[in-house]
């Protein structure tokens, strides 16, 4: 159970970019401002307090000046959370250790580019990108969606995994609406269906009985039935 905090408003995706020398030279500016790092670091430490009280900050401070600012800022923020353990890892080491020992991570906080890559890598630990939910949370608005794209090539085929969308709804209930009990009920419903051995094609393997490999609609219906059985009263 790893929780990633990926900063979404800075880094190389939003820096100046362009070409020169008749198009033969290209550049993308990797830039971070201190307040951007502070904002995401606080969110990560606050979340860690409700979990295993450990934050791993991922950067490339051995070669990148923007990463040196990142590490310096995260260190400063950590002083406000003495009950939370902080460790730093270079992104290349984190990419390796994420596969070697995923259980060593609790909360991971990192920049936009590194987070983009590491979260896709982490999806394979869960079995598929169709299992990973995400929340893009601002000061007033939150956007909740699976980490994968729209996958137009499988539209209408009934093979898409709906669990990431369902889990994204659980995040919405928890983060934006403060409905923690209801969020946990959705998580429990998904877990119950998986525990019974039901799978969509992307997370099935050779040992999965054919009758337990479900299409998109059937998986959604099973999760809904499992959720209804929790019988949480609606206030």
Image (spheres, rainbow, N blue to C red):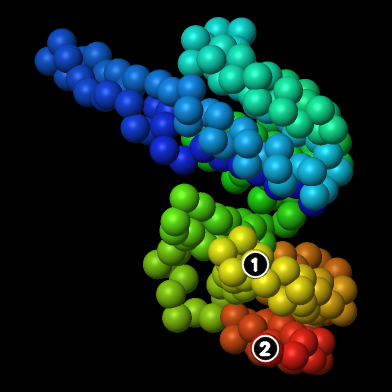
Q: Position of residue 138 (x, y in %)?
A: 47, 50
Real-space Cα distance between discs 1 and 2? Answer: 13 Å
Name the element at disc 1: loop
The answer to whether residue 221 of the structure is visible from this angle is yes
Q: Position of residue 147 (x, y in %)?
A: 54, 55
Is 58 or 155 nearer to us in this picture?
Answer: 58
Q: Residue at x 78, y 65 (%)?
A: 205
- Find residue 185 and report its image quarter: bottom right
- Find residue 155 and report its image quarter: bottom left
Q: Position of residue 48 (x, y in %)?
A: 76, 42
Q: Residue at x 48, y 22 (%)?
A: 34
User: Residue 235: which numbered mark, if any?
Assistant: 2
Look at mark 1 in the image and give the residue it sits on. 178
The answer to whether residue 199 of the structure is visible from this angle is no
Question: Compared with residue 44, is residue 85 higher up or lower down, i.e. above or below?
Answer: above
* Relative horizontal placement of residue 146, taking residue 205 as reference (left or right): left
Q: Residue at x 53, y 28 (%)?
A: 37
Name the element at disc 2: loop
Question: Compared with residue 212, is residue 130 higher up or lower down, i.e. above or below?
Answer: above
* Relative horizontal placement of residue 79, taking residue 13 as reference (left or right): right
Question: Compared with residue 211, is residue 21 higher up or lower down, i.e. above or below?
Answer: above
């Amino acid at each position: 159970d790893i929780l990633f905090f990926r900063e979404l408003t800075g880094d190389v995706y939003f820096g100046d970019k362009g070409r020169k020398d008749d198009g033969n030279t290209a550049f993308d500016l990797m830039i971070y401002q201190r307040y951007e790092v502070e904002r995401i670091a606080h969110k990560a430490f606050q979340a860690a307090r409700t979990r295993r009280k450990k934050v791993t900050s991922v950067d490339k401070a051995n070669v990148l000046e923007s990463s040196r600012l990142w590490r310096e800022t995260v260190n400063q923020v950590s002083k406000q959370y003495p009950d939370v353990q902080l460790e730093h890892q270079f992104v290349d080491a984190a990419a390796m250790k994420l596969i070697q020992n995923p259980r060593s991570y609790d909360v991971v906080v990192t920049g936009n580019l590194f987070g983009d890559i590491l979260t896709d890598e982490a999806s394979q630990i869960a079995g598929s990108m169709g299992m990973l939910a995400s929340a893009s949370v601002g000061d007033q608005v939150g956007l909740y969606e699976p980490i994968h794209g729209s996958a137009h090539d499988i539209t209408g085929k009934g093979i898409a995994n709906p669990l990431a969308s369902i889990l994204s709804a659980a995040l919405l209930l928890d983060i934006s609406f403060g409905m923690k009990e209801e969020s946990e009920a959705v998580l429990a419903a998904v877990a119950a269906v998986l525990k019974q051995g039901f799978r969509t094609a992307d997370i099935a393997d050779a040992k999965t009985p054919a009758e337990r490999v479900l299409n998109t609609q059937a998986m959604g219906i099973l999760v809904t039935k499992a959720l209804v059985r929790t019988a949480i009263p609606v206030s």
